Amino acid sequence: MDKTTDLAIEYLKHRRKFGYALKIEGQQLLRFARFADDVAPGKPLRLNIALKWATQPTGCSRLYHAKRLELIRGFARYCRAIDPRTEVPPPRLLGPAHNRVAPHIYSPSDLHHLQIESAKLGRKESLRVLTLTTVIGLAASTGMRCCELLRLRVTDLDAIAATLRVAPAKFSPERILPLHSTVVAALQRYLKVRGRSPVFTDRLFVGRNGHALADRTLHEQFRRTAQGLVAKGARPRPRLHDFRHTFATSWIAEWSRLRAPVAHHLLSLSRYLGHRHFAETFWYVSSDPQTLVGVGTTFQRYFRGPARHPSYEPSPIPVARAAILRRAPPRPAEPEPSNRGRIPRCLPAFSAVSI
């Protein structure tokens, strides 16, 4: 085995010890390592080799080339610690490697369409149909990630307390989500049908063969169900993950219409979604201009004062106003906090938060 390929294998092992899956990224990186060994065997990694491989696919977008080069940067930094002759590609050499596009925001009519189409996959009370409809309903009512939905276990549901345990995923800590009574009833109905079928896993959602529902199977079934929907985002078709955007956007839009500050709500929403940084939650709102206008109007009403805004009213939560939403005066430089701007762990119990 050649030198660059050996380093790539060791690099992937090192990253995966920290919890990174690196499935597609790992395959791409190994292809690059083999390419580098063929072009310059036994030599350190050079910038011209990285650029040649990153821009090799013709007819692709600039963003795709930038993502391929970004993949090499982390590996090059690893190689440089071993061989100082390694050249690390500068950041954004081919432009930004990440470009968030506008998601599809589901409407009530979209949900009704999905319910009708999912019933066409089989008998109305069959486990296959009920699995898809339950997954869609749970995604819409909680905003959970697809990987979190598939990793749920039967024991994660506490029907008495009306809560759902979500295991750590994508660097999100474990969290307990409060559920609406209708969601609990739907999950209990699903478990009843699930119990009448041969099942060989403790995962909550199962496939046709009784094993855990596969990610590929779920997305294929959802694509068939969502074929009749008109995409309202930048992608050609709606995705199951867009329910997460819809959940966050709809709640923040609702809070922006209230006559109370939304700071404490945003904090709860960030923790509910499993985010560690507020910037991650803000992305789910930035795709909806109407929501941003409503939030901006609320901010002006509460934090500009009566002299600048006629509809000003005192904030019922002055601590949140002063500490989170109002810009603080300049202060001397202080040491960076240990949490690096992450959401604090000391938050109110989510069983008492109505979302």
Image: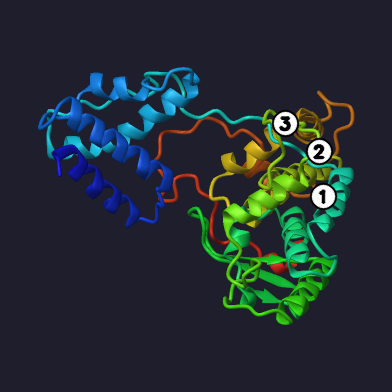
Viewport quadrant of the N terminus: top left
For mark 1, does the 10 Å Cα neighbourhood hold few (<14), some (14 to 19), or many (20 or more) residues? Answer: many
Q: Amino acid at mark 2?
A: Leu
Q: Secondary structure at mark 1?
A: helix
Q: Is residue 189 above or below residue 271?
A: below
Q: Secondary structure at mark 3?
A: loop
Distance of label 2 from label 1 (alpha carbons): 9 Å
Which residue has dot 1 on it?
A: 114
Q: Which mark is in front, 3 or 2?
A: 2
Whether residue 194 is visible here, answered yes or no, is yes
Which image quarter: residue 321? top right
For mark 3, does the 10 Å Cα neighbourhood hold few (<14), some (14 to 19), or many (20 or more) residues? Answer: some
**x and y percent of residue 275 in the render?**
57, 50
Q: Which mark is in front, 1 or 3?
A: 1
Q: Amino acid at mark 1?
A: Leu
Viewport quadrant of the C terminus: bottom right
**x and y percent of residue 29 in the render?**
32, 38
Which residue has dot 2 on it?
A: 229
Q: Amino acid at mark 3?
A: Gly
Which residue has dot 3 on it?
A: 233
The answer to whether the residues at label 2 and label 1 have Cβ atoms under 8 Å apart is yes
For mark 2, does the 10 Å Cα neighbourhood hold few (<14), some (14 to 19), or many (20 or more) residues? Answer: some
**x and y percent of residue 215 in the render?**
58, 55
Q: Nearer the viewer, residue 65 or 269?
A: 65
